[in-house]
Amino acid sequence: MKDLICPYCQEMQESDDENNTQDKMYETECVKCGKWFGYVVDWTKHCFERELPCANGEPHKWGPIHAYPEERFRDRVRCEWCGMETTKAQLERENDAN
């Protein structure tokens, strides 16, 4: 992905994927004009809102966790709304108590 613009000749070019520490000055050489210039990585905060019915009195919407290794997650479930995780055994114990 071309995400840098040379401040000397305005040529678009790619930054090194390994250079991703925020507020650190990196140096690179322009592929067109050959001049060295610096750049600082800045991450922008983005928020994605969504409803949380389980935080407003509705029961959690439990679903299987599809992850690797499968054996580790076979007995676990995750709420599709809030991301809370628990085991199937814990849910059964809670249902038996009610």
Image (tube, rainbow, N blue to C red):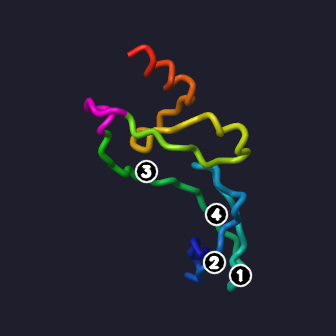
From the viewer's perspective, is residue 39 above or below residue 59? below
Q: Which residue is at a point 65% across and 39% down the rendered structure image?
A: 74
Front label number (2 vs 1): 2
Q: Which residue is at a point 32% across and 40% down the rendered structure image?
A: 52
Front label number (3 vs 4): 3
Pointer 2 residue:
13
Q: Which residues are magenta?
A: 53-59
Between 93 and 14, which is closer to the camera in this rendering? 93
Callout 3: SS: loop
Image coords of residue 45 (percent x, y): 43, 50
From the viewer's perspective, is residue 88 above or below residue 39? above
Q: Are marks 2 and 1 in contact (CB under 8 Å)?
A: yes
Q: Is residue 13 left or right of residue 18?
A: left
Pointer 4 residue:
38
Image coords of residue 17 (percent x, y): 69, 63
Question: Which label belongs to residue 44?
Answer: none
Q: Are marks 3 and 4 in contact (CB under 8 Å)?
A: no
From the viewer's perspective, is residue 60 above or below residue 20? above
Q: Is residue 45 left or right of residue 72?
A: left
Q: CA distance from mark 1 to mark 3?
A: 30 Å
Q: CA distance from mark 2 to mark 1?
A: 7 Å
Q: Is residue 53 left or right of residue 96?
A: left
